[in-house]
Image (cartoon, rainbow, N blue to C red):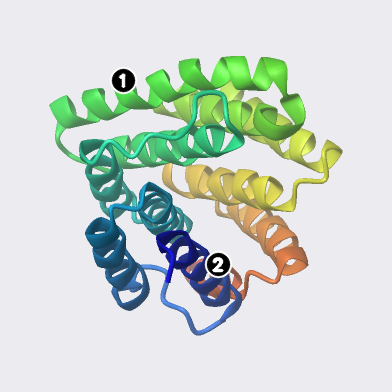
């Protein structure tokens, strides 16, 4: 089998997993780790890219930013390089930045947090040219990273404005997964940064609606568990 077919098989497996409501988004070693071993053995950059970035995506959806960054660092150490200026590179900057900003607010290591913020802000800067050239593809990505950056800096009014703006741009361009991400990350902000459970619930419900349009049942199941937990604690 041509190595490129392995990349397509991995991508198909990723889609099947995200469509399955019983998928554990943090437990996918059987699919992607086998694919990684095959990609490394065949020296197929395309398959490596698909396997590593799919793992990062699943970890970001699960909110496991520490695991996502571990894979990001592995990807970078292997020099899996996407073409400059491509849609895939803009996506990579997006999920990388979300991972860096996400973990920076959860780690207790102050020095490490600063380094994560630096890496997140680098993603913001590198994403700006994409957003300027192709706003339909990259603008909502950029604005969501700006929201996370504002939250890290405790500029809460600006952060809330940016979360709303990111969602609005995604709606304008009919980008359901970016709308879902904007609402999901806004919900996490309202819980973890400002302690507003009511607004978090509203954002989680909006995220679920967007994910339902995509039929991403694995992510929907996870968010519904968070909604139930918030409702019980309230």
Mark 2: few/some/many CA within 10 Å (<14, 14-19, 20+): many
User: Is residue 139 something one can see in this rendering?
Assistant: yes
Image quadrant of residue 96?
top left
**Residue 111 position within the rendered picture, expressed as x and y whole percent measured from the top left:** 14, 25
Q: Secondary structure at mark 2?
A: helix
Reply above or below: 6 against 163. below
Q: Which residue is mark 1?
A: 118
221 left or right, relative to 112: right
Q: Secondary structure at mark 1?
A: helix
**Residue 121 position within the rendered picture, expressed as x and y whole percent measured from the top left:** 40, 20
140 left or right, relative to 123: right
**Separation of marks 2 and 1 at Cα, in angstroms:** 29 Å
Residue at 68% from the left image edge and 64% from the top image edge: 208
**Residue 36 position within the rendered picture, expressed as x and y whole percent measured from the top left:** 29, 62
Residue at 41% from the left image edge and 76% from the top image edge: 24
Residue at 25% from the left image edge and 57% from the top image edge: 40
Image quadrant of residue 62?
bottom left
Reply above or below: 103 against 234. above
Mark 1: few/some/many CA within 10 Å (<14, 14-19, 20+): some
Reply above or below: 145 against 153. below
User: Is residue 156 something one can see in this rendering?
Assistant: no
Image quadrant of residue 39?
bottom left
Q: Which residue is mark 2?
A: 223
Q: Quadrant of the N terminus?
A: bottom left
- Mark 2 or mark 1, which has the lower sequence index? 1
């Amino acid at each position: 089998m041509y190595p490129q077919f392995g990349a397509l098989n991995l991508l198909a497996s990723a889609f099947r997993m995200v469509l399955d409501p019983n998928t554990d988004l943090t437990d996918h070693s059987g699919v992607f780790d086998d694919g990684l071993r095959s990609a490394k053995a065949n020296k197929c950059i395309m398959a490596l890219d698909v396997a590593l970035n799919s793992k990062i995506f699943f970890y970001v959806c699960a909110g496991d930013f520490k695991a996502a960054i571990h894979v990001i660092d592995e990807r970078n150490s292997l020099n899996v390089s996407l073409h400059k200026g491509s849609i895939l590179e803009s996506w990579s900057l997006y999920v990388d930045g979300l991972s860096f900003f996400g973990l920076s607010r959860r780690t207790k290591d102050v020095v490490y947090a600063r380094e994560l913020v630096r890496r997140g802000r680098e993603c913001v800067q590198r994403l700006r040219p994409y957003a300027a050239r192709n706003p339909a593809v990259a603008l909502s990505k950029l604005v969501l990273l700006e929201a996370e950056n504002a939250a890290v800096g405790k500029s809460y009014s600006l952060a809330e404005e940016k979360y709303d703006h990111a969602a609005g741009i995604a709606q304008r361009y009919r980008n359901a997964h970016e709308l879902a991400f904007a609402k999901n990350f806004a919900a996490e902000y309202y819980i973890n940064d400002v302690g507003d459970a009511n607004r978090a619930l509203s954002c989680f419900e909006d995220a679920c609606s967007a994910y339902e349009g995509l039929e991403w049942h694995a992510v929907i199941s996870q968010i519904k568990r968070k909604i139930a937990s918030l409702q019980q604690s309230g």
